[in-house]
Each structure stands twice: as structure tokens, then as C-alpha cells.
Image: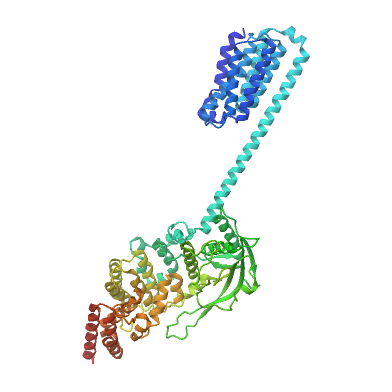
Amino acid sequence: MFVRTLPFILVCIFLLLKSSFKKKESVKIKPNNAIIGFTGCYIILTTILTYISVGFVYWYLLQFIIALSLIGYAVDAKKKRSSVKMGRIWLLSVLFCLPVNVLWYWSGTLHASLAFTLALSVAHLAVTLFILPLYISGRLVAFMLLVIVYAIYCRGTNLLLLESFNFLMSLVGLSLILFLIIVYQKRKLADYMHYENYLKEKIKEKQIKEQEIQQSEFSLYPDLGTIRGHPKEPHVVIDQMMKEVTKFIAYLDNRPVYKEDLNLIINNFFIWDIFLKQRARSRNNIILIPAKVSLGELIRKLEVALKLECKERTIPKLVIKYKNAQLPEKIICDANQVICLLTPIVLSMAGLDTSKHGFVVSIQFYTTYLEYELAPFSEDKSITDVRFPAIALVIGHGVVPEEALPKIKNCYRTLSEGTQCNWYSGVQKESKWANIDKRNIEQIVRTHYGYLQFPTAPKKPMLVVLPCNVAAVRDKMIAAIIPSTTSISSRELKTSMAVLQKAYNSLCTMADMRPTVLDELFLLIRRCYGFRRHASGQLLYVRALGIAELVAKWVPYQPKPVYFTLLYGLVRYAGLPLPYVKANYSIDAYSFIENIIAVNKHQDMEPCGLYVGNRLKRVINREQFFVPCIKFAERLYDLRHAKDYASLEEVKHMVQETLTIDMELGKKYLHANIVEELVEAANQALEACKGIC
């Protein structure tokens, strides 16, 4: 009777395990190679035991083949096989050699004692419960126990059971205990694995979050050019500022921000300036986003940056020393830039440490002051120099001896010293990469209105001085400029805006200037000049753009002289502090403007470096050629508006200087057409003076 129900039982087993043959479940079923090998050995041992107890049956050959295949797969684990395919083969092998084998034992084909058959069945089911996942083996073993009970009932072995009642009860008890132990251990192991996976996910999420925080806070790139090439990465604050700027309807109507109302420009200058610099992505502009940060937090960020930078190298050990009790707990700076400043310095200093405690870098903090000249060329003597509290960082390799430390001054004025000195490295000589690091270091210090002193010899420390509040320094530079808010007629304002737009378009074409760079310059021009007027009666920003157009005409497709012209006018006539120029623009622009400002009279142009004995070598370099271009363009523009001057004596002085000094210099260094334009404008201005008289 039991044999007749075998097909039905096999169908039930298949339906019970049907879902386990799906692709997703088959991947989970495949165990490790050790369990596969153990199962193969178990099948061989039980087959041999059955052969000794009962005798040879051809059924054993199939079991031997399957067992040897499982052992072979476990041994040859290097070969890659599909997890889905192997999971299905594994499940079929286990079903055939264990549960189906149990059915074969109870079918009556195997002439063995009830005790042996029952013990072997319990062993097979225990192994099945152990090697298969619990959600499969639990159902399968429970079903097989019911089948065994039914098989015993069908065999009618009541007398035999009574004879071996004690053995049967002992076997049942041991079986239940064994099954419970296996189930308990598998549940416990599953909980451990689930908890381990949970911890791994949490750790992974934490690492990803920390990495995102590090990138958003530090933006640690080896080259500042990379930072400027990724506009969305440096700071989330920039995106917020862009949103604030684009809220203005006028901007959304394609009206540039520098055409806004003057009061709006003054109130929103720094926000709009950052916005335009971000759009320009100029190599000369580092976006400054000041924020309050403690010295301890700054050091921690530096350690994180060093760890990220030294993935395959020894991380330098930092020795921090606070030399003054008056050091502030927090400073206001751009932490991202300061980390980019300190990281290459620390790495370079670490390479110089050849002691047994190598890769040790000392950073010592001192208090000092930074002093700035707000208007060195202004006639207004009420504008005095200003001082701001600062911190001095002395960075050296290892433990720097006291005699090697630079003497910390009470106040620093110049922005850098020793810039021509070699940037020493203990690993290699000065290279292109070292120079790039050096330029970046200088640029970050300039952006922070700081002071920098490079080491004058190998193993000497470096000195970096940064203001305690860079935002206060930056604000003071612009706050000192109070533009005239004298109202002008709407007609003149409209006309000046048309001139401004025309100059913008012509400079983009003639001087090959980038519109985004001009946007930022034009905003600065509007902010600083306001509605101030020149002695000729012209609005200063209209005059500045007229002079820039003349320079662009004389030196076509060269943006640098136009750039210099506009900045020079701001320093000369609006009182824009030179430290602001040095912090926000290229060092070339600062040096050029400093030189051209020093030329008070036109006869001073030649001694400043223009004169060369050999007339075939007319100028030493291009920057020197720009000096007379800008000065003569300024003179030509003023002569063409001589009739609007209130002082005739000033006009006569300009005419006399043009017809004597300028004409001679122009013949030496400039094109004849420029000289002709100057002479013609001077004669017309002279006639205009006579007509007025």
C-alpha cells in the first residue's frame, strides 16, 4: 500500500520545493565548498554502511557517482560556475541521496531491520536539516517524518514495535533533541549573520556619509585648478548664493547684475561677486567662503586630508604647539582653502625629516598682527593704515630647534618674502609639480590677505600668517570705498547704461575678453565708482570704459592690458586698496598696477624700465609696453573731453605735456597713428581753450 503512494509523495515533495528552484532562491541555496564536500563524504560512508549491512544494490552506484561529483566540485573550487545552476544541481543531489533515499528504504526494497532503517532515516533527515536552508529543510523534514509514520503504519509492525519499544522511544527522543539542537543553532547562526550584515550596511553607510562630508567640507584636491573646474563641488554655499542672485527679476530678464540699482549692488556686492567669480572659473580667482572654525577642528580636518592624500604612504605625524595664551579659540577663514594650503606644506616638510622618528611635522601657533595700507595714493590723509589680529603658523620638519625658528614680529605688512627661493624637497629637486604647489600656496595666502615666508634653505621652517577674521579684512577693503550716491538724471543714467553695454560688447570682441570675467569687473566698477565724476565732468565708470576701449583698439585681441586698465582706474580714482587687488586678482595684475601707480608724471615712464639704449630693442617685455598704452589712452580720452573741464590751466598743462613728453615717447615705443591721434586731440583741446577765453 505504501509503494502505491510513492508517486503521490514525490509530487508533494516537488510542489513543496517548487519555489526553491526559482532563480533568486537557487542563488541562496548553494552552500560553501566545505559543506558540499562533507555531504559527498557522508553519502559515501552511509552507502558503504548500507552495503555491509544489507548487501549490494545497483541503487548504490548512482549515490556513489553523485557523491564523487560533489567532492570533485568542492576540491576543484577555482573553476567558476553559475551560482543559479549549481544551486539547482545541489538541491536535486541532496533530495535524491537523502529524502528520496529514505523513501526507498521504507518502500520494502531494502531488506533491513526496522531499527537500522529508522536510525538511517533519522541520520539522513538530520543531515538534510543541517545542510539545507532552514526554510527549505524544516518543511521537508516535517513532511518526511509524517511519511515515515505513515510507512510504519502501512507495514503493520505492531508486534515488532512492542518488542523494541524501549529502543524506539530512545531513538525518537534522541531524534527530537538532535533536530531541536540543529534548528536552534541554525536560527542562532542566521541571527548572527543578519546582525553582521546589518552592521556591515551601517558601517558602509557611515563611511559613505563621512566621505561625502569630507568632500563637501574640505573639497581636497591636489590642484586648485581642479576645484575651479568643478563648480558644484567646492561649497554648497555657492549654490545658495546663486539662487539668491537669480531671484531678481531683472537678472531673469537677461539684465546683468552690474546694471542693477547702485544701492542693491552695494548691499549685495559680496554675494554677487562670488556668484560672478564662480561663473567665470578664472585661474586668478579663488572663491573665498569664510566660516568660523576652531583651531582644533582645523587640525582634525588637516589630519583627515593627510590621510586621504597618503593612501600608499606613511601619514605624517603632527606635533602641535600653542605658543601664546592669547590665541583665539576660533578663527574665521575658508577652511577648505586653508587645508589645501597646509597639506602640501606638511607633506613636503615630512619628506625632509630624516631622523629615526621620520615623517614628523611641527606646527607652532603664535599671535601677531597684519597691517594694510588702504589708500597709499589717496590725497585724503584721514584714511590711515589698519591692523587686524592674526595667527602665525611656523611649520617645520621634526622637532625644529629654537635657533632655526623665525623671529615672530609684532606686525607684518608685506604679503610675501622669499618667493624667489627654491621650494626644497628631501626626495627630489625642484620640479614642475613643486612649482605648481608653490603657486597654489601663494595664491591661497593672498586670497586670505595673509603673509608668507618661504624657507630660505633646506630643513628651515616656513612661516604663514593669516588674519583671525578674513571676512572682517575683506569687508574693510571695500567698506573704505564710499561711492558717491549723488542722484543723476534718468536720461544720463540711461545713456551711461547704453555706453556700458556698448563697451561690454566691444571689449568682448576687440580684446577677446571672456564675458564672465567682464561681468565681475563691471560689477566692481559700478560698486566702487558709483556716480563719482572726473574733473572733466564725465562719470568715472563711463570714462574708465572709454579708456579701456582705446587700449583694446591699440592692442587688439589682448585681454590683459584691458584688465590692467580697468583695475588701475579703480585703484587710482576710486581708492580700491592694493591688498584687495592682490587678494582677488593675479599677482601680475597687482605688480603692474603697483608699478603704473608709481608713475605720477609722464616723464617718469622712461626711467621705470622703458628706456633701452638700442632703439631696435624698444621694450624689454610686453607689460612695460602696456604702461605707455594705458597712460596715453587716458590722456587721449581726457583731451577729447577738454571742453568740459572746469580748470583751463589743467587742460593747458595736459596739452603742453602731450606735445613735448608724450609725443617723444610715443615716437619711440608706440605706433605712429597713436602719436597722430594724441597730437590732433591736443591741438583741438588748445583751440577749445582759446575759444573759451
Q: Position of residue 452 (x, y in %)?
A: 52, 72
675 or 459: nearer the eye?
Answer: 459
Q: Position of residue 687 (x, y in %)?
A: 21, 88
116 or 213: nearer the eye?
Answer: 116
Q: Position of residue 444 (x, y in %)?
A: 49, 67
110 or 440: nearer the eye?
Answer: 440
Quarter of the image for the C terminus: give it: bottom left
Residue 217 located left or right of residue 242 = right
| Residue 620 lies in quadrant | bottom left
Q: Is residue 188 above or below residue 277?
A: above
Residue 472 located left or right of residue 273 = right
Q: Position of residue 357 (x, y in %)?
A: 65, 60
Whether residue 489 is visible to the viewer of this picture, yes or no, is no
Total label count? 0
Quarter of the image for the N terminus: give it: top right
Q: Is residue 157 above or below residue 621?
A: above
Which residue is at a point 46% across and 64% down the rendered structure image? 287
Direction bottom: furthest residue: 693
Whether residue 193 is visible to the viewer of this picture, yes or no, is yes
23 or 322: nearer the eye?
Answer: 322
Residue 348 located left or right of residue 279 = right
Type of colouring: rainbow
| Residue 366 lies in quadrant | bottom right
Residue 22 located left or right of residue 106 = left
| Residue 126 lies in quadrant | top right
